[in-house]
Image (tube, coloured by chain):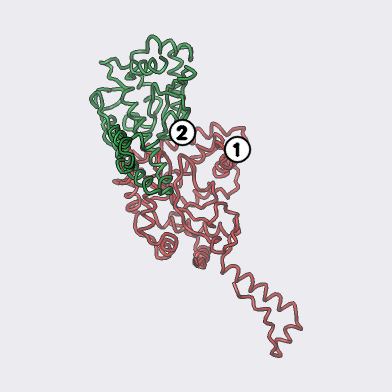
Amino acid sequence: MNDVADDESASDAETEENADANGDTVDALESSDPDEVGPVTWIEQQPLPYPSDALEPYISKETVEQHWGIHQHIHVERLNGMIGGSEWEGMSLGQMMLSSFNEGREAPHPPFFHAAQIWNHDFYWRSMQPGGGSKPSERLLKFIKRDFGSYDGMIQQFMDAALTQFGSGWVWLSYKGSKLPHVNSRSPIPSDNYGRLVISKTPNAINPLVWGHSPLLAIDVWEHAYYLDYEDRRADYVSTFLEKLLSWETVESRLKKAVIRAIERDGHVSRKHVRKQLLAQGKSRIRARPQQANENARGQTSSQEKPLGV
Amino acid sequence: MALRTLISGKTLAAAALGGARTLAAARGVATVALPDLPYDYGALEPAISGEIMRLHHQKHHAAYVANYNKALEQLDAAVTKGDATTVVQLQSAIKFNGGGHINHSIFWKNLKPISEGGGESPHQKLGWAIDEDFGSFEALLKKMNAEGAALQGSGWVWLALDKEAKKLSVETTANQDPLVTKGVNLVPLLGIDVWEHAYYLQYKNVRPDYLSNIWKVINWKYAGEVYENAVA
């Protein structure tokens, strides 16, 4: 049985510390958080969080300048060309992305491809840092071991997903609030309803946000992301990303926010939370019944008031 | 596809005579091989660079061949054991790698150095059919360029012949899906690879430039032969 109490303690820590590993760039990204409601008429491209040569020798300056400066930029241009006067004008990037996804019914609406690719790339740049690739913290490793068996097991699963994404797409590590596909579903099996880390692969522009997951890290496996530096060798690119570029601090700070989101947005409930609730209920019941309290004082137990049993 | 078709005529005849001997004992898996290019890697320059041709053939196509053969061996073992779960689980690797082999085998034949006739417009039957079904040769090129450029992600743009309706059309397929996934009667006359690996080293993200240049080395003679055989 998964012990989800740890997820809660992680989120408690979050409320104490507000500083994120990447400072204002993470805040800037959170402005494209789909939960945010802020009117934006024209989408602006987020700046790179480091200079274009900062990821060398693993990802070249040329690739970064092509990838951010041309590929991602064109998506911004195309999206801005589509949204004026449309139903999407005034939405944030995240809202545009989720609403134009059309809930996965048939093809998405035209803005989806561009909005999602803009969001995906912003997320990808910020999943990396110069000098990244060190191991995750002990706290994060505990979740990884819980959900994948071991760190190496997680890496293997990640590599498999990257090499079996047959075409263009992305590979993700995400936090999912429940075992079930839909974020608001409730299973009668309590352990299904606890959050967990998952690895997923998505084609073209799709990302796990559309499934209600909270992404923690992304790698772009479109060929343009690695062809200039690695040619056809996608495996070399992915292992280099994991060993030399990935920012585990960013992953951990995103996880803290994901746990909060699961609780506040999705009604995710943990054992610790239920226990707290019942305790609170029990206390208020005792205070409301003074006779009962006097009986307690005389030594007669009111065994029905015992709230714990979850 | 029935594995029986992979068994040689000799074993079939022996089985027919033998009676008691099972076909399964004689079953072997016919693997595929990387075809040679009918021209040098650099022969299609400047439309497609020699570096791209070399990587495309020696790395990408070779990987499809190797992975398809591996999946076929695994499929054979799973079918023999009656392991339906593995049979089903192998389908995506077979579709992807098998499709990659099929599509690229066609692609190499669709290209020809300029010195050997690459780029010369289609004549006679195919030329007339293009005029009839698209209005003009230029209109066909414009349509293929537009659909190839608009394809999101990876895939192919095809000049297809519906051999039942005897009609030409422009189709696109995603990833390595062969043309037949768009219609059982569709015959590929011409396929253009619009995966990024087909053009990125030379054209970067400007796929339209790649498309407008590749016509200089398209082998219309081969497309015409396929067309005439299919409608005959």
Relative to A17, A158 lies left or right? left
What residue is shown with label 2? B152
Q: Residue at x 59, y 33 (%)?
A: A84
**Label 2, label 1: how far apart the Cα atoms are:** 21 Å
Label 1 SS = loop
Q: What's under tag 1, amino acid-wise?
A: Trp
- Say which of marks 2 and 1 sits in front: 2
Residue A95 in which image quadrant: top right
Seen from the viewer's position, the closer of residues A74 and A116 is A116
Rendered red, the chain in question is: A
Q: Nearer the viewer, residue B185 or A276?
A: B185
**From this viewpoint, is residue B212 visible?**
yes
Q: Residue at x 44, y 22 (%)?
A: B160
For the C terminus of chain B, the quadrant is top left
Position of residue A151 relative to residue B85, above or below, is below
Residue drawn at 47 percent across, 53 percent down: A174
In the picture, the disc for residue A88 is 1
Check the image and report above or below for B169 versus B16: above
Which chain letter matches label 1?
A: A
Q: Is residue A84 above or below residue A161?
A: above
Count the labels in the image. Answer: 2
